[in-house]
Amino acid sequence: MASQALAARQRRTNAGYVFAAPFLLLFAVFMAVPIVASFVMSFTSFGLGDLADPFGASFVGLANYAALFADSTFRQAALNTVLYTVVGVVITLAIGLAAAVGVNRALGRLRGIFRVGYYLPVVTSIVAIAVIWRFLLDPDYGLLNDLLRLSGLNAVNWLGDQNLALPTITAIVVWRNLGNAMVLFLAGLQGIPNEVYEAASIDGAGRWREFRSITWPLLHATTLFAAVMSTIGYLQIFEEPFVMTQGGPLNRTLSVSIYMYQQGFNFFHLGYASSIAYTMFVVIAAVTVLQFRLLRPEA
Amino acid sequence: MQRIVGIARLVTAAVLVFTVACSSNSSSGNSTTSGSSSGNVTLQVWAMGDEGDKLGSSDVIQQFQQANPNIKVNVTAIPWNVAHDKLITAVAGKQTPDVTQLGTTWAGEFSKLNAIDDVPSSINKADFYQAAIDAGSYNGKLVGVPWYVDTRVLYYRTDLAQQAGINQAPQTWDDLNKLAQAYHSGGAKYGIAVSSNNWQEYVPFLYSAGGDIMQDNKFTLDSPAAVKALTEYVGFFQQNLTPQTEPQGFDVTQTFTAGDTPMFLSGPWHRSLIDKAAPNLEGKWSTAMVPKDQSSTSFVGGAEFAVFKNSPNRDAAWKFVQYMTQPATQVAWYKDINDLPAIKSAWNDQTISNDASLKVFGDQLNSAKAPPSIPQWEEIAQQMDDWLQKACLGQVSPQDAATGMQQAATGIYKP
């Protein structure tokens, strides 16, 4: 009896492994192996010449990481990425929350229109968006500058000015990511029972008081989630600056991801690029842990 | 999850390269089954950009196949912007075609990968423009056979120049600056369009000032001639005679035909672009040799053919390359797509010698120079672009930019 049950259980477990196998295999080949391999690679001088003989690459210990911290272009890219992230996340969350509260209040058909309007950029191809914005922002022939000139103002070199390029791109990325944050907050808002607001209004609470004492605390979990997700997204910012400025002018819009791509695939310094990838991984992991610590609701 | 995906972007690609390279090491010896020089052969040819689009269906290929019934040519078109990466990946994975088109600055890199077959002695270096041979050689050995050449010359608006009272092409740097100012004060938005971050537009100034990128295997990017060239170049920015920075996708054809930038330095491809964009401008613009300081010396570009070492069809591949560099083929190809012949004698053909507008390019090619053929060129070029831009935007002096270029290049270069 006992051995029969054991055999049956064994069969069930086998079936489980069979079902899981396709995913595990793909995960191993396309995720686990590359993650380990690039970790190893980050301690080698793997470069163009080693493509012919991958095992000929020499180990250099922490030299790639040391070079990274001495690399002024990397420092510029890191600074830019911090700027993209801090400014981007705060504005995205603030406007996303405001939009969600507004859309939640709006009645009937209007609500649908706003919801679609905010969310549409999220589901549009980033490259298409970036190309269109590049046209709109063209200093000589762009629509935006045409409008400025029509209203008697000076044209602005949006993507060419070294001090304006990063804010311009940040604004576009915020506009694109807004929908995501808004949808998250909307879901959070709809999870707050109406009775709480009714009770508050009976107690004589105004709109602002309602927001501060009910909406904001009850949205805590949503805010944490939205903050973590968008921070991770901004830290990896790549497509918009890559398509619009290629990191220029003077590397003022260069992000860490773009720099990693350049090092890896333009110059084939795969060892160095791997060390950038791992530095980024550690930073993102650390920031995420920190966010959980700081924003966790006091239980 | 998302961050794992992000990191995996790089590592997946890296490891694919890695594993493919390992796995095919063992089997590289037995890939000769797909054909030999006696049987029927299908040649895989990779070509880029315009050439890639048109080569496959061209008369040139038809005639080659008629003359060699046992050889079939299969052209794969590859966009220029991914061509370099695709070729490197192909080499790593040993999935190379038989013949490929190469950019003129890539010869060093690919021969260092030990991927390219030696050019047979039946191809005579003396038939080609010297600069094109220089570009295709690595350590003195020819690896890429020049297919077509181009060189940058000065495009300028004759109608607007006449309005400003100037009736001849600028001969010297002084003339160039005066004409730019004349255009500008005559109402044009700018006087000239030079790029703040494109070394290819800077080097004609460097060469013409008597400087060079490299001499005797040492960089000379901070020579007095280089500082002089940079000062002249940056001058256009200081005097507001050129757009400060142009975003990605800036189209000089558009600003040239609109009269906003009545001068720029570019290659022969711009002739048809301007004709197409503004047919009504015919006769209102012209080309001239690069204005001179010590000399009028421009930059040579174009493309080469290379045959891969591990191709099982090397004989047929070299036959193809040899055919493509015959003077008659070069002329026929010029008629097809306006690519300038790399073979000097092809320029004696009436189709080309009777075209007065080509004379400028022919003359310029006689003295044009190629950038050094070294494996790390792409990286050095990016450093040159960066320092050039710093100088053009006024962040550093031309002297400091020259020093910066020199130090960066010296640090990157490993012979």
Image (cartoon, coloured by chain):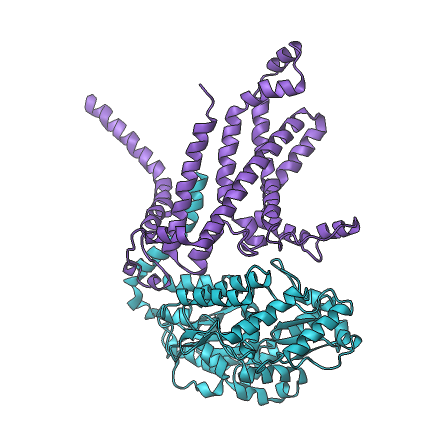
> In this rendering, is residue A241 above or below B199?
above
Q: Is residue B77 visible?
A: no
> In this rendering, is residue B12 above or below B1?
below
Which chain is tinted purple? A
Instruction: Residue at 76% x, 52% y: name it.
Output: A149
**The C terminus of chain B, quarter of image:** bottom left
Name the image quarter holding residue B253: bottom right
Q: From the viewer's side, name the closer residue of B50 and B137.
A: B137
Q: From the viewer's side, name the closer residue of B243 and B395.
A: B395
- Chain B appears in which tint? cyan
> In this rendering, is residue B413 above or below B142?
above
> In this rendering, is residue B229 above or below A212?
below
Q: From the viewer's side, name the closer residue of B185 and B24.
A: B185
Q: From the viewer's side, name the closer residue of B201 and A8.
A: B201
Tell me residue B108's x, y (percent). 41, 72
Instruction: Residue at 62% x, 72% y: name it.
Output: B265
Tell me residue B397's x, y (percent). 55, 64
Tell me residue B53's x, y (percent). 56, 68
For this view, does A60 lie left or right of residue A235?
left
